[in-house]
Image (cartoon, coloured by chain):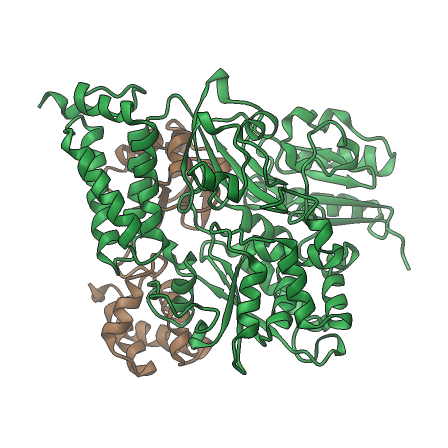
Amino acid sequence: MTVIRSMVLVSDDPLSRERNAGAVQERFAEEIRRRGLEGEIAVHTISGIRCKTVSPLAIVYPEAAVYGPMRVEDVPLVVEEHLVRRRPVPALMPPPHKFSGRLAWLPRRKGTLPAEQRVVLQRVGVIDPESLDDYLAHEGYEALRRVLGTSTPADVIDMVYKSGLQGRGGAGFPTGLKWRFVAGAKSKKKYVVCNADESEPGTFKDRTILEGDPHSIVEAMTIAAFAVGADEGYIYVRGEYRLAQARLRKAIRQARQAGFLGENILDSGFSFDIHVHSGAGAYICGEETALLESLEGKRGEPRFRPPYPTTCGLWCKPTLVNNVETLANVPAITRNGWQWYRMFGTPGSPGTKVYTILGNVKRRGVIEVPLGITLREVIAIYGGGMEDGTRLKLAQTGGSSGSVVPASLQDTPMDFNSYKQAGVSLGSGALLICNEDTCVIDLARVLMNFFRVESCGKCTPCRVGTRRAHAILTRISRGQGTMSDLDELETIAEALATLSNCGLGTSASVPLRDILRHYRAEVEAHLRLKVCPAGVCAMEGSRD
Amino acid sequence: MDAVVDSHRITLAVHEALEEHGHSRGELIPVLKAVGEALGYLPTLAMVEVARAMQIAPGQVFSVATFYTLIPTEPRGRHVIQFCESAPCHVQGGRLVWETLRAELGISPGETTPDGRWTLLTTSCIGQCDRGPVMMVDDDLHGDLTPDGVGEILERYE
């Protein structure tokens, strides 16, 4: 048996690919081969470390030395100096301040960056996502083994329930309760569906998980299927996520071959299999009943509820629908116990949350932190502060189920309950940080345009309301608004919130209500004075 | 409109998609996507043929096809630009880039240039927001766009 003394990991994600990471990896392999070291030094890919300033990265283990951005012509030097002479090349290593918090796991960097709490992302960026061996070496399929070996379905559900895990798709529904409903539904046929149709503006946490650790979802779904009594599963991945789809398909093939999926899993008598289904481009399919319609080959229009999917889901069989991030918590909870999980976060909202930080901050990216951290902390610690000395005006927390959060709430703990009490919502985990150059009318117009385009058209309040609201906001941004527009916006928001058939319409009301509540003066300046205080709106029609 | 693709090619593409995905109703979307990818778009005749093969009404096929953005039902240019118009890209400088892009191409969203080189579309968030503003040109992703840099990217596509 050959002993691998060093390992080179080259980042492989859309950004790295665009910057020639493939050629960098090939050059590493070539240089290593040329020196006859291919038995001692392995070259693999990793994904998920999407550090804009340093991609593509090459990480050399066991030293965990990080090189980047790597150019093809730098490769021979790293191979000769670091891998042959064992002298790392500091000149090619980026200084620590160029990293965002997502590299905190690197042993060498410990203490130089604020620690994240990685549960969901524990393997992302650490393992080769296309290698089952890597997954197994990092506690992979241990949770499944334990569940099938020693637990009853009731035990598993009890554990998930006690962990306090809440759905991470945006609504925050208790996961254990959902599992209990499906388990309790009487039917020979049941399904487990993973909702990977991530399309909330500003959100790419699920893609990070799927691209970086696809086996964790396969394992989690299998555990869920055992708990609720399902024998077939679907992962509904949005059509644009091609790399995620390819990696999931590969992981499923590997899991089948190794006996973690398919007939009689690990000789337990339990059978379960998973299909990957590619979406075809429709935001609304992230709504769970629309997703089920789409899986059945129909237009993705949300169903009227009740009945709920837990009793009448896919092909009207009891169906468990969980978000990617929700599922990714399950193996860790199973391995470490629900008490361990409750050490993170707040009593009302245990666990961690994956956020994407975007907008006018110095560093954008993905972080995983305990629930209950504040917006101020996120901006200061992980975002590196506001861009160019500007000041925070508001944060938009996720396209659909989120809110426009004013700066006055930046010290409110970010967890499902505290936010609810403050009258705002956490949404899917996108944190779009906006400075004072942002105009609330302009922002609301862009958000409303999104809802207008993505409304499926099934129910009238949403189809007409989003269209109407967008037209009014556009008019206001041109300086042609009147005070009566305020009343009409209020009426539309009310109708959207109370009469829409699904969450899309309800969510569309949120930015309207938020700007009218928190930024009334700024809105009225557009109407009465025909002035955009932030200087964004063209107001070109005001002199007509 | 259907004259763009001859009927023989349509029949062949439909046949191949059905071979791969099967005839069951649940496979309608993958079948339509596959035909669309093979032909560049989904012609009406293809929808009729799929409907016949799956024994469902052509109207149903049409209503499903037009629901999804990844199933184009009209011919497109040689290269398709999808510009993200969601809030994060907008806040991160997308507005100016968009104005430049439109001026450069001289067309409105949804249109194709007269020489058939470009189709310009807007898209909702494509999940690459830490690099916004972003656009897709065919299958390639371009991030961190600036008004000055857009022209150079377009030149790379014939």
Left or right of A47 on screen, residue A447: left
Name the foreground residue: A186 vs A117.
Answer: A186
State whether residue A386 is above or below residue B82: above
What chain is the brown one? B
Rendered view: A264 above or below A293: below
- Name the quadrant containing residue A99: top right
The quarter in which the C terminus of chain A is drawn is top left
Q: Is residue A316 left or right of residue A301?
A: right
A505 to A398, vertically: above or below: below
Instruction: Please give the name of the residue rendered at 39% of the width and 31% of the height, measured from the top-left corner.
Output: B91
The quadrant holding residue A491 is: top left
What residue do we see at 52% from left, 32% from top?
A412
For residue A371, side relative to residue B75 (left or right): right
Q: Colour of chain A?
A: green
Count of marks overlaid on the render: 0
Q: Nearer the viewer, residue A183 or B18?
A: A183
Residue A465 in sight here: yes
Residue at the left extreme, as displayed? A544
Q: Position of residue A75 (x, y in %)?
A: 72, 37
Give x and y (percent) for residue A101: 64, 33
Picture quadrant where residue A402 is located: top left
Q: Let me know if residue B34 appears in the view.
A: no
Quarter of the figure with the N terminus of chain A? bottom right
Q: Residue at x 26, y 45 (%)?
A: A494
Tell me: residue A27, above or below residue B51.
above
The x and y percentages for residue A374 are 56, 32
Q: What residue appears at the point 26 percent right and 61 percent down from the top-left corner?
A: A458
Front-most of residues A285 and B120? A285
Q: Is residue A200 left or right of residue A52?
A: left
Extreme residue toward the top, this view: A389
